[in-house]
Image (cartoon, helix red, strand yellow):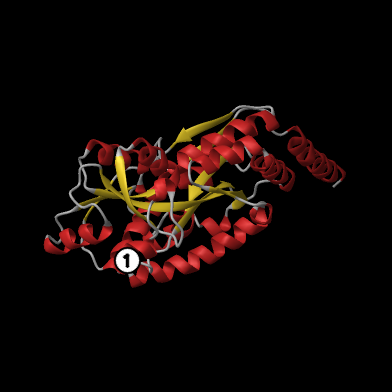
Amino acid sequence: MRLLATLVAALLLALPARAQDFPNRPISMIVVFAPGGATDVLARIVAQHMSGTLKQPVVVENVTGAGGTIGGTRGAQAAPDGHTLTVGSLGSHSASPSIYRNPGYDPRQLTPIGLIAGTPLYFAVRKDFPAQNFAEFAARARAEPGKVSNANAGIGSTNHLACALFGYRSGLKLNEIPYRGEGPALNDLVAGTVDSACLLAPAAVPQIQAGTIRPLMIASPERGANNTPSSTEAGLPEFVFQGWNAIFAPRGTPAAVHARLAGALSEALADPTVRRRIEELGSIPAITAQQGPAPLQALVEREVARWAEVVKAAGIEPQ
């Protein structure tokens, strides 16, 4: 019994010591979508700052497929020691339970680190598409149902959900083409391989400003980059959508490690340079009231319930 008591005491003393020593090696930050998309771009901005705060490299690793759930599963099943994080999205970490019968994890059961930013959504077309505004686009799509192609970042992604909501609100039937991430979808839109796409601001805004794609609307009551018409001005006021990106750790991550990671993210979001970089991409950095684990947990709980209703109403069949 004395030996058992000694072992238990040693274990209890060792746990805080390990948390105190955290991190003791590079941190892997899994991004659940391909390079070049909103999730990837925002992750790299905060990872750079967090590396300095944590005194260890925070290395971004893109693990793609199945609407972000392949990367989400790997992150959820990693050792809960704080050295593996996951940057997820509205799609991968709130709609996934409604989109997939077995996504491999329950986002509500993960350890929330914090929200990075909100991400407005643009509906854009290739630069040489004949329609000059949404009314003309809608007329063409109605005249040729299922022929106008529309790219998204994969089944269950934020972009796919936005496209589903767009189709539900507009009544338009487009030829939906899923990709393995927003980056590849955007590349094909720029190349003119597809006609249109639902794109989150960090991916869309640089291309809009460069003139390589043409935005027909932003899914918001306010105008967007390059004076992009709001959805109300475009004639589709019901199409209001904002995605988000956040950082998660596996369930069971020690409280001290959890707090250290959340603090490092908060420090990044308090840095004016980081906030400016996020804002220049058209995203909205999390304000103080939105930062930290508790607000993110509440957001995930709300979003899981909300998207269960939207997925059902839009007639999306679980995969």
Which residue matches tag 1? 235
Residue at image x 35%, y 64%?
165
Instruction: From the top left corner, tell me how far across and down residue 279 is, in percent.
Output: 54, 43
Q: Residue furthest front?
A: 227
Instruction: From the top left corner, tell me how far across and down residue 233 is, in percent.
Output: 36, 63
Instruction: From the top left corner, tell me how far across and down residue 263 is, in percent.
Output: 71, 43
> Is residue 245 or residue 253 the one in the foreground?
245
Q: Residue furthest right?
A: 2
Image check: 282 left or right of 21? Answer: left
> Is residue 9 or residue 25 the one in the foreground?
25
Instruction: From the top left corner, tell me how far across and down residue 195 is, in percent.
Output: 21, 47
Quarter of the image for residue 47 reads: top right
Q: Is residue 121 above or below residue 281?
A: below
Mark 1 lies on a secondary structure that is loop
Image check: 156 left or right of 301? Answer: left
Image check: 243 left or right of 258? Answer: left
Judge whether residue 157 can be spotted in this image: no
Judge whether residue 14 can be spotted in this image: yes
> Is residue 32 or residue 117 the one in the foreground?
117
Quadrant into which the C terminus falls: bottom left
Quarter of the image for residue 6 reads: top right
Q: Is residue 52 above or below residue 86?
A: above
Mark 1: which amino acid?
Gly
Residue at image x 46%, y 43%?
39
